[in-house]
Image (cartoon, rainbow, N blue to C red):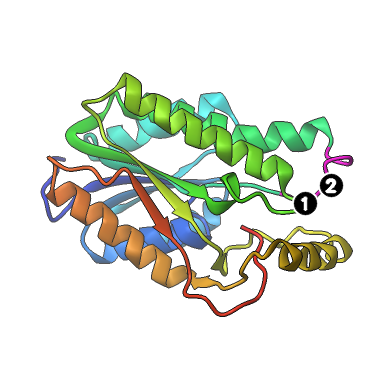
Amino acid sequence: MTSTSNEPRLLIVGASSGIGRSLAEHALKRGAHVCVSARSADALDEICAEGGGRGHAIVADLARPDDCRRMVDAAAGAMGGLDAVVIAAGWGTLSMMTDADPDTWRHAFEVNAIGPTLVCGAATEHLAPNGIVSFISSESASEVRWGLGAYAASKAALDASIEAWRLENPALRFQRVVMGATSPTGFCAGFDSALFDAALEAWVSQGIRGDLMETDDVGRQMADLLWSALDNPGLVVSDVRLVPVASGVPSPT
C-alpha cells in the first residue's frame, strides 16, 4: 500500500476512547488508512468495523517498551509505511503529593512521557518524507492543577522531549497539541470523589476555568490539523493550543 494525499496512513495511539477514538473515526470517514492502538481489543474492533477495510487494530500497552516498538512496526507493515503518528494516550490520577506513591509516578511517566518517546523513535524509521508525529500534551504541563502533580510533571517531561526531537531531527516534523479540558474522555473516571470535590474548590481558587470542549469537536479539529500538515509538507505548525470558549467551571486537565 502506498500513500496518497486523499488516503494517508495514520497510526493513532490511545484510540480506544476519548480524543484518540474520535480522531480515528473522523480519519476513517475521510478515507484514511488507520491503525488504531490501545489495550482494549473490543473497542478497537468497533472502530475498525466502521472503516470499510481501512482500519487495523493493534492491541498494545504504551507503558510496555516492547509494545511500543511492536505496535509501530505492525502499523507500518500493515499500511506500507506511515504518513502520520498521533499519540493521544494519557493517564493521570488525583493524588496529593504527600500521598503519591512510586507506582503512581512511574505509571504517569511510562504512559505520558516514556512510551510516547519510544513510539516516536520507532516511527521515525517508517515515516514518509512529508510525515509528521503529533503529540497530545496538556495545559497542565504549564498550569499545574492541585492534586495532579504527577500528571503535570509527566506532561512537562513530554514537552521537553518534543523539543529534543526537534533539535536533533530538524528535517522531521514534530507537533505538540496543548489540549484543554475535553469531555467525555474518561480521564476523571477513577478519581476519588471526596478528593475530587476538594480539587474542584482548589481549582476555583487557582482561577482555572472549567469550560469543556466536546470530544467529537476536538477529534474533527485534530483531523483538520493532520490533513493540513500532510497537504503542506514544506510547513510545520509546531505548537497548537486547543482550548474551550470561556464560561466557567473548574476543569482537571
141 displayed left or right of 146: left
Asked whether 95 falls inside the magenta stretch, the response is yes
Q: Residue at x 67, y 69 (%)?
A: 250
SS assignment for the magenta stretch, majority? loop
* Residue at the disc numbered 1: 147
The percent coordinates of residue 172 (x first, y second) are 24, 30
Q: Amino acid at mark 2?
A: Met
Q: Amino acid at mark 1?
A: Gly
Q: Residues within 10 Å of mark 2 (few under 14, many from 20)?
A: some
Camera sees residue 197: yes
* Residue at the disc numbered 2: 96
Compared to residue 130, the image places residue 188 above or below, namely: below
Q: Residue at x 47, y 64 (%)?
A: 243
Camera sees residue 57: no
Does dot 2 land on a helix, a strand or a loop? loop
Q: Residue at x 52, y 38 (%)?
A: 60
Instruction: Using the numbered discs, state the Cα–Cα distance from disc 1 to disc 2 in whole angstroms.
Output: 5 Å
